[in-house]
Amino acid sequence: MASPQAENEDGVNVNQQGPLSSATLFNSSHETPSAVEAKIIGTIPQWVSGSFLRNGPGQFEAGEQKIEHFFDGFALMHKFDIKDGQVKYNSRFIRSDAYVKATEQKRLVYSSFGQAYIPDPCKNIFSRFFSYFDLEPTDNCNVNFMQLGEDFYALTESPRVIKIEPDELDTIKQANLSSYMTVHTATAHPHYGKDGTVYGMGSTFGPGSSYNIIKFPPGESQNQLEMAKIFCKIPASSSLYPSYYHSFGMTENYIVFLEQPLTMNMFKIMFAKLLGTDFVNCIDYTPSVPVKFHIVSLEDGTTLTRKYTADAFFCFHHINAYEDDSHLVVDICCYDNSDVMEEAYLNRLRDETLSAGRAFAKRFVLPLEQKIVQGNEDNLVTLESCDATAYLQEDESVHCHPEMLTDQYVELPRINYDAFNGKKYQYFYGLDTLDRTKVVKVDTVNKTFMSWNDPSCYPSEPVFIPRPGGEAEDDGDRRRPYLVVLDAQSFTEVARAEIPAEVPVGLHGIFIPNHSISKADVIRIPVYVNEGLINGLLHVRLSPVNIRTADVSQAMQEAQGRLRPGIGDRFRVTLDLIRLLLTTVVELKGTAEVRLAEMLYSCNICEFTVHYPSVNKRTADANGPIRSENV
């Protein structure tokens, strides 16, 4: 998504010949609840079909009170509905407590990342005094989205999450991870396992502060959040100065967490309201303290005992991580310091020349135990064509030195996630943090990059959309703001959709494909066998790994386990029936409704209904033809 430069009253770009002006990029926007059609320039491939959701700050004041830090703007959801080469856009503010109360009271109610707390002037002196010690976290979920089964949640860095409805962008309900476990913060960058498990992180503060891996087991979507549990606790090096973090990495067998020298001063945080300070002023960067890599086994939640360190740096975003010949390869966007926190204050972002932190893409290689020999003074990294090094220290820790993946500044990295997260990969995409008009594609193997830019626009985070059936890793595809579609291989513009509405700068987003069976989809089949109604629904959750025909047996057993006890015996729902259902779905996917109806009818099933999300449902019975209904 690209946001335009400022224009004068005649619609002429006033900065067309000069550097990008950021004066108008970070102002409040209005929501666009009713979808508007975009003007298409070029041709969007027909296979690009789905909803692109974007989250980010959209309003920077409450009444006369101004929000000071970009990270604190009220959450505005954006939806780009892409279908048949056309794009429709709408946006809605998330109706969080923070937004609703600020709108009603015309003032900021919660303290936040860069906003000092201001007590309610209507309270008496005693109430105001005690309110200084209320540390309730904000629910202004303006950072990202998380998908749990069929449900979508907006996220920020507090344990409070908000369930949203992605079609109309409605705010459904609020939830708090602290209701299910003891966590005081949470990351807004979850990871998704092949079996449907979702992993997140959250910190617990107090005596014995810890960084916690949170596990959302696969299950019914309405219960997946409630089933969340702490999978692993990583003790903080200092309970009074725990590390700040924004994301983490995951390979096929490990989670990689960085304990950084950007730490939270718990004394300052506890008295932040009383002292009238914000969160940014409660964190300290200590360049003499090394980064610590914590490695957690996904098999049993244990932490590897070997200590890995690196010279001090700060990061927001992991790019990817994978295992290679008994090494862990960890790619990160690294800053030399934490100045980027200060640079995100709105008065700085609105300067005539946009300034941003300088993040480099770096690769750290951590040799696992098989590569470590006592007393070895040589470089422990044995990967070919790799300049990263790691050396055994006197205290038996391993100190790692990274290699540069590119000399290009880059942030907000994205990869072909579904196919390559946690695996050896070649490409990632991001924004140039020096020239913020550029989107870049980095080749991590050849250490080269390509770029696309429009000098008149400010792009947001790029999101990769894989081409169906594509085998190559990169096989994908007031001037008005626009959605731009780039060919992922050549990195050239394919099409753009000009949006006739205000679209402010956003943070993170996700793409939800249409008519595809993914980890989000549940096939619900009420089945009538002979004259009996199965007392419940047969829920079959298909994850990407068992959509393949070779995995039908595994999916069949998974489906059988979801039948309520006794139902299979009572109504003779056999494994053959389940195999028939799954085989048909696997082979024909979203186009199988009619043939599935015919096959089930031939198996003495009098009536059935198959529901595919966002697809028509068809019903067959013994007395007439298949009938179609919209759902």
Image (spheres, rainbow, N blue to C red):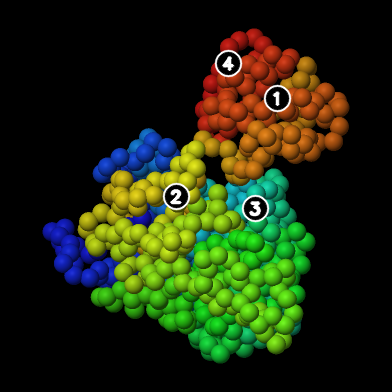
- The mark that comes first in sequence, 1 or 2, is 2
In the rendered view, would you say 218 is above or below 68? above
Whether residue 138 appears in this view of the structure is no
Q: Nearer the viewer, mark 2 or mark 4?
A: 2
**Residue 204 coordinates in the image, percent (x, y):** 69, 74
Name the residue nearer the viewer: 252 or 630. Answer: 252
Mark 2: amino acid: Asp
Q: Earlier in the sequence, mark 3 or mark 2?
A: 3
Q: Where residue 474 is drawn, which disc sits there?
A: 2
Q: Is residue 85 above or below residue 490?
A: above
* Labels 3 & 4 near each other (Cβ < 8 A): no
Residue 487 in percent (x, y) is at 36, 48
- Ranked by sequence position, the earlier of labels 4 and 1 is 1
Q: Residues within 10 Å of mark 2 (few under 14, many from 20)?
A: many
Quadrant where the C terminus sits is top right
How far apart, in angstroms, are the residues tagged by discs 3 and 1?
Answer: 27 Å
Q: Secondary structure at mark 1?
A: helix
Q: Which residue is mark 4?
A: 626
Res. 304 image quadrant:
bottom right
Query: What residue do we see at 82% from left, 30% from top?
Result: 567
Disc 2 to disc 4, C-alpha distance: 41 Å
Amino acid at the residue labelled 3 = Gly
Comparing 602 with 67, the one in front is 602
User: Can see residue 2?
Assistant: yes
User: Residue 580 has which mark?
Assistant: 1
